[in-house]
Image (cartoon, rainbow, N blue to C red):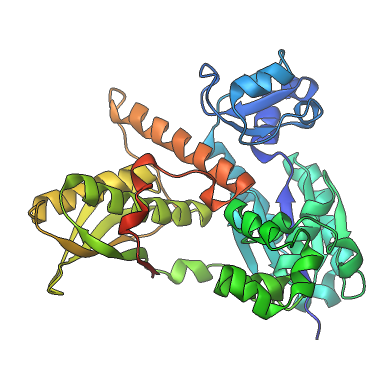
């Protein structure tokens, strides 16, 4: 039986949630940014009026203000966004137990087994749009298709508050003319590689063939080719399926030994960045950070540290990992491999803070930085921004995920 998969994407999510709390914001161009007083801060979200001025996610505040001098700037409230996300996903779960969150404002639903109860995929999508609008006060765009990839492209195709069906009969007409960067896994670096190879659209990807894509982008190229051809068979996870994961880890065997604080910090930053990003995308927090160190003689030590509060902050994971290494390793002793693991995973990142806890301000700053980095990467690809001390490609050899 052909699958029916929905991808539901909240429109201007951060901005829309802020408008619910402050209804006067619906009537003015507004944007959510890390720090409204910092002109070099980044736009995280904007409403439709701001979009009309050409304001885009991930541009700087000063660029946005040049386009719209009367733009209203609002600080983000991430706990509020998570709460609305929980309410929205609770509605999705009334239609299927296969609900997989892609981010705080996006989810896939496999409604194949529910069609006899609720109607066609389009009918379910339209009902969800109506319910989210009436019960939550937000709008969503929904893509309906036979694969996760095409469902997501469908939700991106028409906004706001729209349903787009991508079928086996129409996907070549609708999707193949779109830019190659529209595809999952095609970030800025991959797009540049494809453009150099004369591949500009999703149709070009499909028609270039698997071997050609593999030669340009390796295994990722094969995956992108399969997606462009409608061959994506990845299942939508069931509710709670991701909770089975006890940890998220990432390791690098370096092309040369790391020696000294500068090298070690660079290696740990790469790993912490990867893990923090994966935690945030899954809406998870870790309560324990573990570091595994291997020397050139292949001797291994493993140490861990329990955190005061759950976190998915790249900087907090890095600080914990670095403190572990400094406490358990001679900094001038060579390191061949490092692995950082986030353990004790949960969906609760609430910290028990004193009213006078100075760590609260630092935690808030870390959250703003992560949000800005995530927004830039979502817009321009994973390679669009990196931490400064990771730009030392001479130490990178191989990366292994858990």
Residue drawn at point x = 23 percent, y = 53 percent: 306
Q: Is residue 88 at least partly visible in the picture?
A: yes
Q: Nearer the viewer, residue 131 or 160?
A: 160
Residue 371 at x, y = what percent?
51, 39
Image quadrant for the N terminus?
A: bottom right
Q: Nearer the viewer, residue 334 or 238?
A: 334
Q: Is residue 271 above or below residue 23?
A: below
> Is 378 left, or right, of 332 in this rendering?
right
Residue 272 at x, y = what percent?
35, 52
Q: Is residue 97 at least partly visible in the picture?
A: no
Q: Is residue 24 above or below residue 348?
A: above
Residue 97 at x, y = what percent?
65, 70
Q: Nearer the viewer, residue 346 or 329?
A: 329
Residue drawn at point x = 54 percent, y = 45 percent: 384
Image quadrant for the C terminus?
A: bottom left
Residue drawn at point x = 61 percent, y = 51 percent: 188
Q: Which residue ends up furthest to the bottom in the rendered image?
A: 1
> Is 246 left, or right, of 71 in this rendering?
left
The quarter of the picture where residue 258 lies is bottom left
């Amino acid at each position: 039986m052909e699958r029916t998969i929905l991808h539901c994407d909240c429109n201007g999510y951060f901005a829309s949630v802020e408008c619910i709390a402050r209804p006067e914001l619906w009537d003015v161009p507004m944007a959510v940014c890390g720090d409204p007083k910092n002109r070099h801060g980044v736009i995280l979200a904007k409403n439709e009026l701001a979009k009309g001025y050409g304001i885009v996610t991930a541009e700087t505040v000063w660029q946005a203000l040049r386009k719209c001098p009367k733009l209203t700037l609002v600080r983000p409230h991430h706990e509020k966004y998570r709460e609305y996300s929980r309410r929205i996903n609770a509605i999705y779960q009334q239609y299927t137990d296969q609900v997989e969150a892609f981010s705080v404002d996006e989810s896939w639903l496999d409604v194949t087994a529910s069609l006899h109860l609720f109607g066609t995929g389009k009918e379910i999508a339209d009902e969800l749009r109506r319910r989210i609008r009436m019960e939550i006060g937000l709008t969503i765009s929904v893509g309906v298709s036979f694969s996760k990839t095409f469902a997501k492209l469908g939700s991106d195709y028409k906004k706001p508050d729209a349903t787009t069906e991508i079928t086996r009969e129409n996907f070549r007409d609708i999707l193949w003319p779109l830019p190659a960067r529209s595809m999952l896994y095609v970030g800025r670096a991959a797009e540049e590689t494809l453009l150099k190879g004369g591949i500009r659209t999703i149709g070009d990807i499909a028609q270039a063939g698997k071997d050609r894509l593999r030669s340009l982008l390796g295994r990722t190229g094969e995956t992108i080719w399969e997606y462009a051809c409608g061959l994506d068979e990845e299942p939508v996870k069931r509710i709670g399926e991701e909770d089975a994961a006890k940890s998220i880890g990432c390791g690098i065997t370096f092309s040369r030994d790391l020696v000294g604080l500068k090298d070690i910090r660079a290696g740990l930053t790469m790993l912490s960045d990867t893990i923090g990003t994966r935690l945030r995308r899954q809406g998870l927090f870790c309560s324990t950070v573990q570091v595994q160190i291997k020397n050139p003689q292949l001797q291994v030590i493993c140490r861990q540290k329990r955190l005061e509060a759950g976190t998915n902050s790249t900087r907090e994971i890095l600080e914990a990992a670095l403190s572990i290494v400094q406490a358990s390793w001679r900094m001038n002793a060579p390191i061949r491999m490092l692995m950082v693991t986030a353990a004790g995973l949960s969906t609760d990142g609430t910290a028990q803070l004193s009213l006078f806890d100075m760590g609260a301000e630092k935690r808030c700053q870390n959250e703003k930085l992560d949000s800005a980095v995530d927004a830039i990467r979502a817009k321009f690809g994973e390679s669009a921004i990196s931490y400064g001390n990771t730009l030392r490609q001479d130490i990178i050899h191989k990366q292994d995920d858990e």
